Image (cartoon, grey):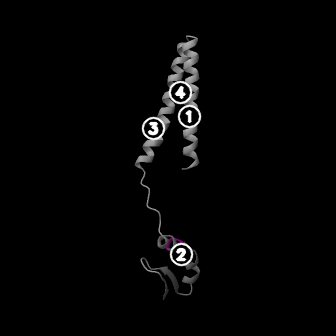
Amino acid sequence: MPDSILLLFAFALALLITSMFIFYFGTIRAVPMAFWAGFFLLGSGFLIVSTVVTKFTFLNFNEFPNFEMMVKRELEDHFNKINPSFAERGLQWKVVPGHYWIELKID
């Protein structure tokens, strides 16, 4: 879970705890402004948590990559770096999808 999500949950928890203290203060001292401020903080925390949970339910998490996908991606990245220098000599490296070999194309 990313650090920003954990920080949002910690902030929502802090809002919840703060709203409980403000509710208590507003109820005991009979201060309506503090009572409504507690509701506002509670609603803000609920909004943060519900937004994060809703966002995560609609995200599409891909399956874990298998070994072939990881190797193919690393090789493609490497070949994209070195192919410009090889292109001057008429050579091009490429990864053949679905197979366990690489190909050197000679022009």
| Mark 1–mark 4 distance (CA, rounded to whole Å) | 10 Å
Looking at the magenta stretch, what is its main secondary structure? helix
Is residue 46 shown above or below 85?
Answer: above
Is 68 displayed left or right of 4 in the figure?
left
> Is there CB contact under 8 Å for labels 3 and 1?
no
The mark lying in front, picked from 2 and 1, is 1
Q: Where is residue 59 in the image (x, y as percent from the top left)?
A: 43, 51
Identity, as a three-letter code, of the amino acid under mark 4: Leu
| Residue marked by disc 2 | 75
Residue 61's mark?
none
Magenta stretch in the rendered image: 72-76
Amino acid at dot 1: Leu
- Which element type, helix, strand or loop, lies under badge 1? helix
* The quarter of the displayed image where residue 34 is located: top right
Q: Mark 1 points at which residue?
A: 13
Q: How far apart are marks 2 and 1 (CA)?
A: 45 Å
Q: Which of marks 1 and 4 is nearer the N terminus?
A: 1
First along the sequence among labels 2 and 3 = 3
For image coordinates 57% across by 36% down, the residue present is: 11
Mark 3 or 1: in front is 1
Label 3 to label 4, Cα distance in Å? 14 Å
Inter-mark Cα distance, 3 to 1: 13 Å
Distance from Cα at disc 2 to Cα at disc 4: 51 Å
Residue 45 among those drawn in magenta:
no
Which mark sits nearer the N-terminus, 2 or 4? 4
As drawn, 9 above or below 37? below
List the residue tagged with mark 3.
50
